[in-house]
Image: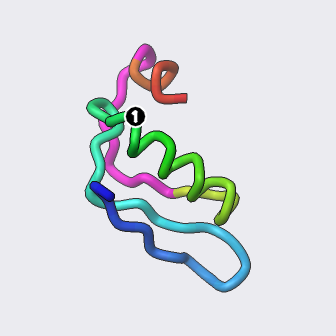
Amino acid sequence: MDFVIKRLNASLGAEITGIDVRNIKSQSQQQLRDALNQFQVLVLREQKLDAAEQVAFS
């Protein structure tokens, strides 16, 4: 795994650190999907995305 997942609280949410979503690998994409399924909400701070990069990431 290229990034760190830190649970935010007992019921929901996780913070993802150590990743630049502009240059994400397919394995990391699947790991993010798995984390979203598990934690339901993901926080990815300080991502510098323009509109096109936001669409591509989503």
- Amino acid of disc 1: Ser
> Residue 23 appears in which quarter of the rendering?
top left
Q: Residue at x 43, y 14 (%)?
A: 52
> Residue 11 appears in which quarter of the rendering?
bottom right
Q: Is residue 7 left or right of residue 13?
A: left
Q: Is residue 21 magenta?
A: no
Tell me if residue 1 comes above or below residue 7 in the rendering: above
Q: Is residue 27 left or right of residue 12?
A: left
Q: Is residue 16 left or right of residue 38?
A: left
Residues 48 and 13: in front is: 13
Image coloring type: rainbow
The C terminus is located in which quarter? top right
Q: Is residue 18 left or right of residue 13?
A: left
The N terminus is located in which quarter? bottom left
On the image, the x and y values in percent for residue 18 come to: 26, 57
Q: Residue at x 35, y 66 (%)?
A: 4
Residues 1 and 57: in front is: 1
Q: Is residue 50 magenta?
A: yes
Majority secondary structure of the magenta segment? Answer: loop
Disc 1 crowd, CA 10 A, few/some/many (<14, 14-19, 20+):
few
Check disc 1 and report the residue beneath it. 26
Residues 50 and 15: in front is: 15
Query: What element does badge 1 sit on?
Result: helix
Tell me if residue 18 comes above or below residue 55 in the rendering: below
Q: Residue at x 54, y 67 (%)?
A: 14
On the image, the x and y values in percent for residue 25 come to: 33, 36
The magenta span reads 43-52
Q: Residue at x 40, y 42 (%)?
A: 27
On the image, the x and y values in percent for residue 9 come to: 61, 82
Q: Residue furthest top?
A: 52
